[in-house]
Amino acid sequence: MEDFLSAIDRHGWGFLPGYVSEGEALLLRGECVDASEKGQFKRAGVGRGLNLEVREDIRRDQVMWLQAGEMAGTDSYLAMLEVLRLAFNQRFYLGLFAFEGHFAIYPAGAFYKAHLDRHAGTSDRIVTAILYLNQDWQPGDGGELKLWTTPDGRDGAFVLIEPRMGTLVCFLAGDFWHEVLPATKTRMSITGWFQQR
């Protein structure tokens, strides 16, 4: 964890394989699949409030927002994120007070074009946190997170992070452009944001 926090301190982003155990990740994946089979997911949109709209040219995933107290695996993960929130506040003095997030399912071929995670005219989303739930992901399966590593830019250096089960990725939500590349099979994650008031 110290190396992970140090990477965020130095670069504004970092990733941590094995943030949750395989068993924990499988439980979360099972909850995601079960909710999807029950029809609890909705097409993801872009924008916020009255400006929210489904734009298949920008993103093609489906989401279900997390609610505490409904699923054991989700509650356990939210408790882990609370520990991480406190660590971020202690280390970086960010004043983070809450987390909001959702399960995300990308069917084969789905994508999310380059974007920032902070809506225009807002400042509440401070740190993005993504946990991957993809078992036996292999090179060539696609679905990588393309993260430009220079704040506020899409022209320079970038990293490709494979969506391997149990890996956590965090970055400053308003600073780093990123996109989800198409995958050859269904891709699952929990994506969310630590917020300030």
Image (cartoon, rainbow, N blue to C red):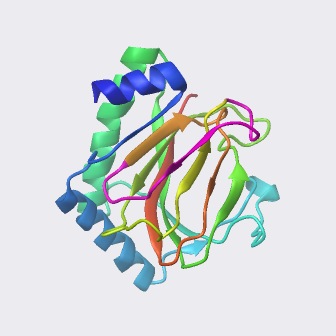
Q: Is residue 94 left or right of residue 57?
A: left
The magenta-colored residue range is 151-167
The quarter holding residue 62 reads bottom right
User: Does any portion of residue 86 appear in the rendered image?
Assistant: no
Decide: is 166 above or below 82. Answer: below
Where does the image place residue 63, in percent across and percent down from the top left? 54, 67
The quarter holding residue 177 reads top right
Question: What residue is rendered at 38% in x and 71% in y?
Answer: 32
Quarter of the image with the C terminus in it: top right
Where does the image place residue 117, in percent across and percent down from the top left? 65, 44
Q: Check residue 160 for magenta coloring.
A: yes
Question: What residue is rendered at 37% in x and 77% in y?
Answer: 33
Name the residue nearer the viewer: 46 or 182: 182
Name the residue nearer the viewer: 4 or 159: 159
Question: Chief secondary structure of the magenta span?
Answer: loop
Q: Check residue 176 for magenta coloring.
A: no
User: Does any portion of residue 176 appear in the rendered image?
Assistant: yes
Question: What residue is rendered at 59% in x and 50% in y?
Answer: 146
Name the residue nearer the viewer: 20 or 148: 148
